[in-house]
Image: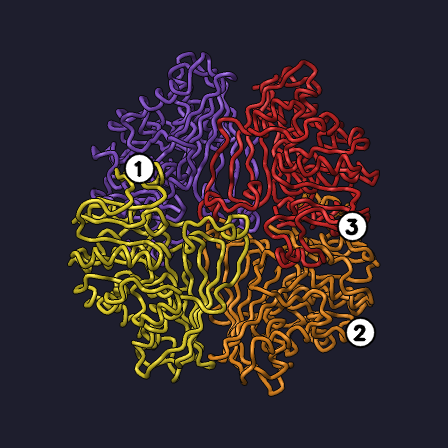
Chain colours: A red, B purple, C orange, D yellow
Amino acid sequence: MKVGIINVTGYAGMELARILHRHPEARLTTVTGRSLAGQKLGDAFPHLRSLDLTITPEIDGSVDVVFSALPHAASAEALGPLVKGGVKAVDISADFRLKSVTDFESWYKVKHPHPELIEEAVFGITELHKDKIAKTRLVANPGCFPMGAILGLAPVVKAGWVEPAVIVDSKTGISGAGRTSDAAYGFSELNDNSSAYGLGGHRHEPEMTQELSALAPRGEVSVTFVPHLVPMTRGILGTCYATLTGSHSQQEVVGLFREFYRDAPFVSIAGKSPSTKQTWGSNDCLIYPTVNERKKRLVVVTALDNLVKGAAGSGVQNMNVMMGLPETMGLEQLAIYP
Amino acid sequence: MKVGIINVTGYAGMELARILHRHPEARLTTVTGRSLAGQKLGDAFPHLRSLDLTITPEIDGSVDVVFSALPHAASAEALGPLVKGGVKAVDISADFRLKSVTDFESWYKVKHPHPELIEEAVFGITELHKDKIAKTRLVANPGCFPMGAILGLAPVVKAGWVEPAVIVDSKTGISGAGRTSDAAYGFSELNDNSSAYGLGGHRHEPEMTQELSALAPRGEVSVTFVPHLVPMTRGILGTCYATLTGSHSQQEVVGLFREFYRDAPFVSIAGKSPSTKQTWGSNDCLIYPTVNERKKRLVVVTALDNLVKGAAGSGVQNMNVMMGLPETMGLEQLAIYP
Amino acid sequence: MKVGIINVTGYAGMELARILHRHPEARLTTVTGRSLAGQKLGDAFPHLRSLDLTITPEIDGSVDVVFSALPHAASAEALGPLVKGGVKAVDISADFRLKSVTDFESWYKVKHPHPELIEEAVFGITELHKDKIAKTRLVANPGCFPMGAILGLAPVVKAGWVEPAVIVDSKTGISGAGRTSDAAYGFSELNDNSSAYGLGGHRHEPEMTQELSALAPRGEVSVTFVPHLVPMTRGILGTCYATLTGSHSQQEVVGLFREFYRDAPFVSIAGKSPSTKQTWGSNDCLIYPTVNERKKRLVVVTALDNLVKGAAGSGVQNMNVMMGLPETMGLEQLAIYP
Amino acid sequence: MKVGIINVTGYAGMELARILHRHPEARLTTVTGRSLAGQKLGDAFPHLRSLDLTITPEIDGSVDVVFSALPHAASAEALGPLVKGGVKAVDISADFRLKSVTDFESWYKVKHPHPELIEEAVFGITELHKDKIAKTRLVANPGCFPMGAILGLAPVVKAGWVEPAVIVDSKTGISGAGRTSDAAYGFSELNDNSSAYGLGGHRHEPEMTQELSALAPRGEVSVTFVPHLVPMTRGILGTCYATLTGSHSQQEVVGLFREFYRDAPFVSIAGKSPSTKQTWGSNDCLIYPTVNERKKRLVVVTALDNLVKGAAGSGVQNMNVMMGLPETMGLEQLAIYP
């Protein structure tokens, strides 16, 4: 099985290369990148020097599956012809996540290059859409924030146990911003520093709203989402707040989560408050729901590695399902701690 | 004016020494510490070597004002006789914050050593209780989390503009845990790592509830408070979520905050999302309120240095007011950035 | 092949468990620990929850190979009977590294529990002693600092190209101090902070002296070694300074290194100055020699992960060689970057 | 006394503004910046909002003293006319540090705009050149690395106690690179990472060579200098290695240092190994010399804040001396720890 990565030079692209290098069924045969085209992958990124590949401007040769880690719009533009030419694709960008092209164009301020492919694209949370992913040729991998937020709220939203207005307060490591030359992401600016951003509305909110609303028995879920930058390289800790509709106990809620994720190899209902580093480099999502019965308050904490379960890892998980391979293939590596 | 610090060897105690060293009216004459008694202050803590003081087991000689940075219960025990002997006191511990001795004993699992002093103690948020602080002999300095949360919500709670159920999601630097030998606070455990804690109930919640409820026109405010550890040394970023009762605009809310803190030299209503490092080493609290009118959602972000405005700095601010000095004396130093 | 880990609860022990979990020929069957005995491994350390093992006070059942990550003296005491009972052993502690029992007892201030095993123990730098490791039943894994220092200087010392007085200035991540409850290793103390230590003499210096002197054509090498704590979790950057005896060019020196490590799968002569994170979680050692011909100055920079190539990874590498397996088995994982 | 800062928008410029704000005799009246000209200082940098100044493209109005924090060449170009017009100047850039214009042009690859001013410029280590600084109109503030290296070696070099070949291994926080948009200085690249750079020769080496050689009784000192990036915002830890010419004891060497810096208010001979954070935000330089008599090896560790004693703080110290004010004025603030 030959695999290509479009835009290997960002953090998600690099991480795809790292994971695919050890995948027993996938052979990485071509990697693209604009500014570094012509360089050996191992010269540009020394930790990938075991991969004997040269960065090319475009996909080189035929592939069975392609990942795109390009920015939005550019990604759909590159994937359109490939998908139509029979290549299965996992899009790490935002282009095929929102079912409404109007919403996409309003949030991303750009015309969608291939709106005709949106309908068949499957939102890539394997835990929710495994059957559809197995049959599609185009997976829209979710944003890093929605991955944790949706996994953390899906069981109670689907069960109708919470009021529709939910709050997601996420703390992300800086690699979520990508390999950027923006001075605001410099070490001296962000080290020992925390801040909220996107307070006027963040592009990952409509993904959460779309997916949670689709699960809710009684229509739309309203999500207040505030992302925060905290000084770590990897990891997203999401704290989700909801109001319980009835008098559900801690035990009932934990039981609901365990049942919901019974067959999900990468989701683990934690016995105590999880920390992001427990997922460093692994495809795990740790979920910890807690109930304050007196206040009817549900707080769900989720932890994952934004570049693995939040991007490249779940991308490979989706590829596995799409290609009929075991869901966990190539993703068995434990988290690196400390 | 002679000043003493009980337990100078913790982070709040050290920070009091640092600030008082440059205070034009206060002369630090005695500092106590148990394990390091007998050592020169500058041998134990090289950054304080300009202060020519020896750590003693008890307050040495007469003082006009005393700060206690002891743990709870021990603090009240040490302060009781001093206050009764005519020394003015600022208690950095939790002992005199809660007006209900039952609440105190239930949250802190210890018998209160001097319940008879609780009534006269004033909760030390200068911005709210300046007049009372000017007349008291005992200030109960607030917890580091309540400082930001109460300042961030006080204007809208007092105006009756928000529903009583509020959420406070705080991200704290590790120095909030004090100078501890607990392995869980080791560098390797916490670096590049984030987690939530206190999910079963944190001791700073009743302070928030007490103070905000006292401000609310219609009785009790219900606070859901979740603190998080993020990998920075100093700083607390608090994100407060409330539901607006009416259709208040962003502009109205900002106007309300500006008016409320018109005479507060250390509170600044920020023009954009603040970051904790903008307050490093200073006594500032930055507040940034944002409104989503469609969702009737208010989000207030607050940033402060947990060891300064969250402890030692506000302690000195309270001392200034208590002693009839200008509120800002000795606290004019700008934040150190980056 | 059944494998046990004595003292899985420190960072080196945990890391052995992580690596062995994915080793195709080794089955981890027993892990010991004192304070956490009786706990499930995954309850104590959530990132290891896929390993269905309970921590026991002693090795449980028969094993073919055992790793000891106990402190010095305790390690030899535990390994003595096992080795004599026919179990092959890799000792991560310092007990069998120094060939002189007098030196050991003088540096470590303790009587050696099994001096009779010192002679047969092989110093575990696979790149230097592969043949002997293949035949021994006891490997003394080197200290984390000596690994980089010896690999970085061995080629030029063996070739007689440098004066005998060398300097090793190492910068280590904090995990090198282990999972400790010492307040001096707290996050708030070490974050954003650097310092030198061991200036009166560090225990890893005699290892460097012993191994480099054994390679030197003309007797003893004199090592000045100064370790430094820098605020990162993993990684050792070693900067080695030597004076060239002749007029060797940059190109000649690089050629010497490439030739020396031609068959070493985990040593890479870097094309530009390496950084520690390029080895995060991998068993690689990156080496970058530079020559200033005018000053006859050689500077060699080495980078490795102190818990992998500096401890658990090289331990597994040695186990592979000792058991007749391919040297790289179970160690192919790429570094995780960023 | 009216003071201006040219290029307030870099880290050294900002730090000058922070320090001068609290200086009792200096009034900051004008600050320049190119990209941010027209903005209020407090809008661009919230921690400076107490300074009611607008950033202008050029110095606005007459000043008595000017600081330039421009890059090299641009700095001399801006200062030339001002100095000739009677304004006293402290140049934070490298333009007037090297006495040889040939050396300057060879290291910096640019033609010097005002070579005629080099001779009268005084190298700004107050501890060495106080008398000359008191009489000059132009101070060339040293580089951040040379400050620690020269202070750490000056006493023994001047006394002729060490061989001429010395090694300086420095570890710097990232703010030394300035407020840059270079992707290589991004948080995700540098966090939890260390590396050496400038191995082919760093521009601060000729400053060290020039100043130490001028002190040496027997001609030129040869400096091998290797700077390292370590993941902290501020601070330089310098480890200097020299070979003692005679059998000087630890006690003699410490005595020499104490005597040499007897009248230096900002230099402190530390009683134990210092750490960089003990100088955070202060103008202190901590020096810790250690001797290994058997090896005739001297190791001197120095710690300072690269933006204060390594730039803005020593700049203000020089200004004080140049203007006839007490050396310590405005610089008494203690380090902020932790």
Kindly give the residue lying farthest to the bottom in the view shown.
C218
Establish if D142 lies above or below B281: below
Task: Tell which tag, 2 or 3, sits nearer the viewer.
Answer: 3
Residue D46 lies left or right of residue A265; in this view the side is: left
Q: Chain of mark 1?
A: D
Q: Which residue is mark 2?
A: C135
**Residue A27 bears which disc, if any?**
3
Residue A32 coordinates in the image, percent (x, y): 67, 48
Residue D290 higher or lower than D6, as above or below: below
Do the CB atoms of the residues marked 3 and 1 lie less than 8 Å apart?
no
Name the residue tied to disc 1: D40
Q: Residues within 10 Å of mark 3 (few under 14, many from 20)?
A: some
Which of the pair A81/C39 is nearer the observer? A81
Give the left or right position of residue C275, taking residue A182 as reference. right
| Residue at (65, 50) in percent of width and height | C35
Which quarter of the figure has residue A134?
A: top right
